[in-house]
Amino acid sequence: MLKVTLKRSLIGSPEKLRRVVHALGLRKINQSVKHKDTSSVRGMIHKTSHLIEVSEVSED
């Protein structure tokens, strides 16, 4: 499992990038969500890596 946290504001970001962040389930700064480690999620993380923070958590 991956824990994804939005660390930077989306103000001034392109609309396409905002949609990717919203598709990850992030709406507010410092909000965290958990996702399964899949290739599609990894691609979204790679595209928004300058705005988010990612850490691995156990599947408890």
Image (cartoon, grey):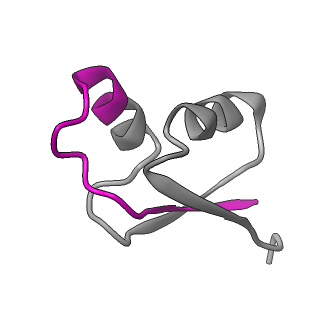
Farthest residue in the bottom direction?
60
Residue ID at (37%, 54%): 26
Q: Position of residue 37 (x, y in %)?
A: 77, 46
Residue ID at (62%, 35%): 46
Residues rendered magenta in the picture: 1-19
**In screen coordinates, is 14 left or right of 5?**
left
Instruction: Work out which quarter of the rendered image holds the C terminus and state it.
Output: bottom right
Q: Position of residue 49 (x, y in %)?
A: 55, 44
Q: State the residue in front, 1 or 60.
A: 1
How many numbered circles are shown? 0
Instruction: Work out which quarter of the rendered image holds the N terminus and state it.
Output: bottom right
Q: Position of residue 20 (x, y in %)?
A: 41, 32
Residue ID at (65%, 29%): 43
Q: In the figure, 52 relative to 59: above or below?
A: above
Q: In the figure, 29 relative to 43: above or below?
A: below
Residue 37 on the magenta span = no
Q: Position of residue 19 (x, y in %)?
A: 32, 30
Q: In the figure, 19 relative to 54: above or below?
A: above
Residue 16 on the magenta span = yes
Picture quarter containing residue 42? top right
Farthest residue in the top direction?
16
Residue ID at (25%, 55%): 9
